[in-house]
Image (tube, coloured by chain):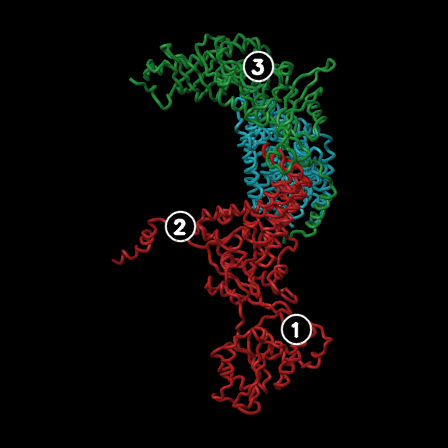
Chain colours: A red, B green, C cyan
Amino acid sequence: MKWLNALLGKRTRTAKDRAAKKELEEDGENFTDHRLDISEREAVAKSLSLTKSLRENLKMIREITGAPGDLTIREFKSGRGQVETVLLHLEGFVDNKLVENILRMLGLGSFQAPVGRGAGPNLLQEFRRRLLQSAETKEVATVDDLWNALTNGYSVILCHGSATGLACDTWGFKYRNIEEPSTESTIRGPRDGFIESFYTNVALLRKRIKTPNLWLEEFTLGSLSRTKVGILYIKGLASEELVQEVRQRVSRIKTAAILESGYIEDFIEDNPFSIFPLLFQTERPDRVTGCLLEGRVAVITDNTPFVLVAPMDFPMLLQAPDDYYEKIFIGSFLRLLRYFAFGISVFLPGIYVAVIIFHNELLQAQLLLRIAAAKEGVPFPVVAEVFLMEILFELLREAGIRLPRAIGPAISIVGALVLGDAAIRAGLVSPPVVIIVSLTAIASFTVPTFSFGIAARLLRFIFIFLGGAFGLFGIQFGGLLVLIYMSSVRSFGYPYLAPVAPRILQSFKDLAFRAWWWRMNTRPLLLGAREPVRQPRGQQPRPDIEEEEKEKTGKGRKNDH
Amino acid sequence: MLRPGGHFLKLTAVFCLLSLFTTGCWDNREPEWLASSLLLAFDLDEEKGEKMYKAFVVLANPLFQSGGESGSTGGGGGEKMPSWVHSARGRTPFEAILNLSQGTTRQIRFSHTQALLFSEKLAREGIWPVLELFQRHRELRPTVQTAVVDGDLEELLRTEFPLEFLPSTAVDRLLRITGIERSIIPDSQLLKKLIEFTRPGEEMILARIKALPQKAGGEPQGEDQQGQQGKGQQGKEQRGGNQQVRRNQQGQTPPGPPAEAIGAAVFRGDKMVGWMDGHETRGQNWVRNTLQRGVIVIELPGKNGLAAIEIIKIWSKIKPRINGGEVTITVDITAEGRLQDLVVSPAEAPRPDKSLDQDLENRFAEAIRRECERSLTRAKELKADIFGFGNAIYCKYPRLWEEHLAGRWEEAFSRLSVEFLVEAPIKRWGLILTSPSKR
Amino acid sequence: MTTEKIHNRQLVFMLFMIRSTVTIATLPVLTTGTAEQDAWLSAIVSLAATLLMILLIGGLAVKFPEETVFEYSRKLLGKTGGTIICFFFLWIFLNTAATEVRIYAELLKIGFLPHTPLIFLISSMVLLAAVAVGLGVEVIARTADALFFSYIFFIAASLLGALKGFDFINLQPVLSRGFGPVFSSALTPAALGNQNLVLGVLVPTLTTPRKAIPSAALAALLSGIVLILSTITVVGVLGPKIGSSSLFPFFLMTKAIEISRFVERIEALVVIAWGLGIFINFAVFLYCGARGVSQLAKIRDYRPLIGPMAVLWVILSVHTYDDFLDLVKFFQPRVFFPHSMITTVLPYLLLWAAYLIRHAGRGGKKYIRKRRIKPE
C-alpha cells in the first residue's frame, strides 16, 4: 500500500520521499509483461527511478507508456554539442511557443556550460538556473514523477548522465472561454462561470476575495485519473471543525478516477439515501464567493465547472444570485414566488388528484362541473392520467436535453403541440390535467438549482400516488414524512432545514425575504459563529450621514483650531 | 451524532410503497362516477297511510357542460339538459335521498348542494328531521340557502329560469339577491335558521319562494305589490312594485319569472304556522337589524306627489325593560335614507329646505314604524316570536325568563307591549337638489 | 442519546401544539360540559388549572434537571413505590396518545373517509410518529419548529374566516346560571392538563432546564388563549346549543365558513392542518412512553422499543373504545377528572411530599425511611 499512500499524498511530500524512492530497486523487467494488471503496473511505474543512461530512460518511458504518438521527444545535443539531451512533452498540453523558447535557450551554445562526461547533472543545474527566469521548474526523479509532470503540461529535459530530469512549466492547454453558465443564468449579475480548468476557477474566486486568508488546499484523487481537487475556505471565518471534516472526508476518498464533482459528492455527503442534494453545486463564481463569505467551504474539482459547497441548507436551493443584486422588494418577491413554485412543483399534481377523487367539495361547483365535464369520456382514471402526462413531460424534458441543439425546437413542437393537442382531441387526457402538468413544469423550472429540481420531480410522483390512494390524508402523510426526514438530515453537521428548523430568527433576514445589505449585519448564526458580526450597524443611508460622521471625526479637528 | 437511521427510513419507504399496492383505495371516486347535487328539496307524500318524505334533487349534468364547451368531446352533448331533477321517497329524509340513487346512473355527491327547499305541506308538518340531517351528514353543510316554496315545488324545479342554466343557481341567487336588494325575505342561510330554532324565545322564519305557474301565452300571476298595498293600508305609503310584467308591442308575453322570493314562512317550533307578506317580513328585518337595502315610498307634504327613499344604513336594537313587574320591549331603530325619486309635476316641485327635509324624515320614520307594527301584529296573530324578543329578555333577565316566561312565552308574547323608536335621517338627496324646471 | 438537546422555544412550540390540538379537536368544554354560552369562562378557569398543574409537574422536574420523572420518582419514593407511580405515568402516556390518535382517526373517518378502515388511519399516523421518534427528540422538536407557524396560520385563518357569521347574542346571557356549570365544564379541560406530564421527561433534554416552568407556562398561556378564542368563535357562530350538541364543534364551525361562493367547504384543509399539530402530539407522547419504558427496564437506548410500543399503541387505540360513544364517555368530567386526579395529581403530590420531607431537614432521614414503606 505504500505506493497508494505516495500517490494520495500531497505534492510537497514527494520531494521528501524522493530519497527513499531512489533506494527502491529497479524492477525494469516486469513492465513489458502483458499479464500485469493495472494496479501492478501502477506500482511498478511508481517504483521506477530514472537512471543515468539517457537511452535506458527513454526505453523505460516508451515501454511504460506504450510510446504514444502524442508524446513528443525532441533529441538534441547541448553543452557545446557534447551531451545528449532530450526534451519530452505531450502534445496539446503545452504552449509550443514556450517550448520553442526553451529549446532556443538550451540549443544555443552561447553560454558557458560544463562539458564532458558527468556533465549531465551540472548541465541540468545550469539549465535550471537559466530557465528559472522564464518558467517554473522542478526536478523529477522517477518515471511516475516524470509522467505526472508531462500530464500537467510540463516539458521534461533529460540529460545523459543525470539520474533526474528537469521539468519546466510550459502549460498551454486550450480551454473554452469563460462564459455565462447556461444552467444558471441571471438577469443581473456577473456573467462569468467556472470552466474546466482548476486554476482558472480558483482565480475566478480569488479575483473576488483578494484577502490572503482565502486558503486553498490541494489533493490529488483517483489512482488513475489523478484529478486535482482543492478545498477552498476563508481561514479564520470557516470553522476549523468544518474545514477539518471536509478535509478528512475528501482525503479519505480512494478510487480509480474522479471525473466530475458528483463523484466527490457521493463520497463525502452525510446521508446516501437523501433524495435532496446535501452539497450545493454551482457553476457561478459569485454564488461560491457568497457561500465562502458566510463561512462555508468550497470543493473545486479539476475538469469540471461544477464546484461543490458544504455545508448546504435547504433555503440555499431556492435562492438565486439575482436576489442579492436586485432591489430587496423584487428580490424578496421573486424568492417568495420561488418558494411557492417549489410547492407547486412538488405538490400540485398530487393535490389535484387528491382533490378530484377524494375532496371535490373543495372546488367551487362551477369549477368542479367544468373539470368533470372535461374528464367525461376520458378512459383513464385520474391518477393514471396525471401520471402518464407527467411521464410524458419527463420524457420531453430528457429528450430536450439530449438532443442536438438544432433539433431541440422540433421536439418541443412535437411534444407540446402534436402530443398534447392530439391527446386532448382524441379524448385521451382531459385539458385540466394538461394545464396542471404544464403548470407544474413551469414551476419546476423556477428552481435555481437544477439538482434540486430533480428531487422535486421524484417527490412529485410519490405524491401523485399518495394523493391518489388516500387523498389529502395521504399528501399530509407524505409531506410529514418528508419534513421529518429533512429535519433529521444534516449536511456536514449542520441541520439541513436551518434556519426554519431549528428556528433561527436572526437568519430570517435572508430566508424568504432579503434584508438590505446594510441590515445584514450578522453572518448566519451556525456557520459564521467565529465572527458573527459582518459589518458595523447603522449604515442605513440617510441625508445627514456625512455630517454625523464629520461630527464624529471632526471633534478632534475642532480642538486643533 | 444524530445520523438519520438509514434502515428506519428504508423500511418506512418500503412499507409505504407496499401499502400503496396492497391496500385498496377505499374512498376515492372518479369524477365520472359522480353526479353533483346542487339543490335539495323535500316534500311530504303519503303511501298506504304512512308519511313519506319525498326528496327532489337537482343534478348538474356534466355531459351538457362538455357539450357546451367543446363539440368534439362528448358526442351529442348539445341535446342534453343542463340539469336533471330527480325524486325519490323514503320514511326518513336520509332514506329518501339515498333512494334517489335507485334511478340515477351515478353516485350522488351532496357537498355542492347550494339550496334547500321545503314544500308548504312538509313545512306545516315539521322540518326538523331535514335540518337535523343537514347537521349530521358529512357532505351536507349549514351554509345552504333555504326557503319554503309557496306553490308547486316540482314545477318550480322543472321550469327554466331565463338567466340561469341551473335551477339551483337560480334559487341560490334569487334568495341572495332579493335579500340584498329588497330585504323582503328573512336571512336565508340555514345555519342562521338552526340557531334561531335553538334559541329560547325565538322562532324560525324562512324565506318564501313563490312559484309562478307558467301558462303558455298567459300572464304569470305575480304577486302584485301594489294591490296588496292597497288592501293593507289605503295606499298611503307605496313601494316600488317594479316586478310588473311588461307586455311588448305585439301583445305577446315573453315568459315572466318562474318564481319570486317574497315574504316569509313563520314557524312555531319546527312547524310552519303561516305566511307573511313582503312588508311584514321587512318589518321583521327592521327589528332584527338584518335589513340591507330597500325602498320606502312616502307621500309628499303637499299631497301632490310621491317621494322614494332608499334605505342606506340601518341599525336597530331590542331593549327589554321591566316596568312595574311587566316586561316591555323598546326597539331602537336608526335608518339612514337617501332621496332617490320625486314624483311630482315640475311646477309643483317642492323647494329643498330644512323643513321639507324634516317633514320627509318624519314621514320616513313613520312609515318604518308602521311597517314594524304591521309585522308585529301579524306575528302576534301567528303566536310566533320571530323577532327574538323573548331571547332578548332571556339575555338580559335570565332569571325572570327561566322562572316566569319560559313556559308560557307564546301567550305572553301575544300580550307583549312593544314600542318602536325610529330615528330616520335623510342625509343625501342624490346628485341634484331639486328637479330643474323652466322657471 | 442523552446528549440530544432541545431548545426551550421548541418546548414551548411542542407543548403548545400538544395542548391546543386536542382541545381544538374536541373542544371538550363544549361537548362535555354544561356551560354552553359561558364555555369561554370555563376555558379561562381551565387555563388557571393548567398553570397549577404545570407548577406541580414542572416544579418537581426543575428540581431534578438531569433526570426524568421515571428516575427521580424511584429515588424519592423508593423502588417499589416509584415503580408503581411510573406505571401510572406510562399508562397516561400510552392512553392519552392512543385516545388522541383515535379522536383524529374518528374525525377523519366521520368527516372524510367513511370507508377507510380505522386501523389503517391509526397505524399510518402512528407510523409517522414512530419514524420521528426513531430519529430522536431533536427531530421532533425541529419538526415542531417548522410546523408551528403554518399551524398557527391555519387556526387563525379558520377562526377569522368564521367571524363572518359571528353573532354576539349567542354569547349572552353571561353567567345566567352562576358559576356552577362553568366550573363543571372546566373539569375536563383542566384534567387534560395532565398532558403536561411530558415535562417530566422533556425537561432533562432542555438547553436551560431551570427555565422550564416559564416555557411551559407560556405554552399553556398561548394554548389557553387559542382555546378561549376558539370557544368564543364557535359559540358565537354556531350558538351554544348547536355547539354543545356537536361532536367536533370546531369542525362544524369550519363547515360553516363561507367567505364567498368560491372560498367555502374548506374543512378538509383545516383538518389536515390539525393533523400537523396532532402529529407532534403523537410523537412526543410516544417518545416519552418509550423513554419511560427504557428507563424502567434499564435499557440504555429507547429506540428498539419504538416498534413494539407503536404496535401496542395501535392496539390500544383500536380496542380501548368500541365506538365513539365510549370516547365521549371517557371525556365526561365524572370519568376523566378522577382519572386524571388519580393518575397524575395524586402521584405528584406524593412525590412532592417525599421531596419536601427529604429536604426539610437533614435530621429527618430516619423518618423518611419509615414513611417510604407505604408510598401509596
Q: CA distance from mark 3 to mark 2?
A: 70 Å
- Give the residue displayed 59% in from the left and 39% down from the top: C15
Q: Which residue is mark 2?
A: A538
Q: Would residue B21 appear left or right of C222 to someone viewing this image? A: right
Considering the numbered disc 1 on the image, is that residue within a helix, a strand or a loop? helix
* Relative to B97, residue A428 above or below: below
- Is residue C358 in sight in this rendering? no
Contact? badges 2 and 1 (CB < 8 Å)? no
- The answer to whether dots 3 and 1 both sit on one chain is no
- The answer to whether dots 2 and 1 both sit on one chain is yes
Q: Amino acid at mark 1?
A: Trp
Point out residue A61 in the picture as x, y percentages from the top left corner.
Answer: 63, 80
Q: Which residue is mark 1?
A: A3
Q: Nearer the viewer, residue B306 or B94?
A: B306
Residue most toward the bottom?
A116
Q: How many numbered marks appear?
A: 3
Q: Amino acid at mark 3?
A: Val
Q: CA distance from mark 2 to mark 1?
A: 58 Å
Q: Chain of mark 2?
A: A
Q: CA distance from mark 3 to mark 1?
A: 101 Å
Considering the numbered disc 2 on the image, is that residue within a helix, a strand or a loop? loop
Q: Which residue is mark 3?
A: B266
Residue most toward the front?
B250
Considering the numbered disc 3 on the image, is that residue within a helix, a strand or a loop? strand
Point out residue B163 in the picture as x, y percentages from the top left corner.
Answer: 54, 26
Q: Depth-wise, is mark 2 or mark 1 nearer the camera?
A: 1
Quadrant of residue C198 within the rendered picture: top right
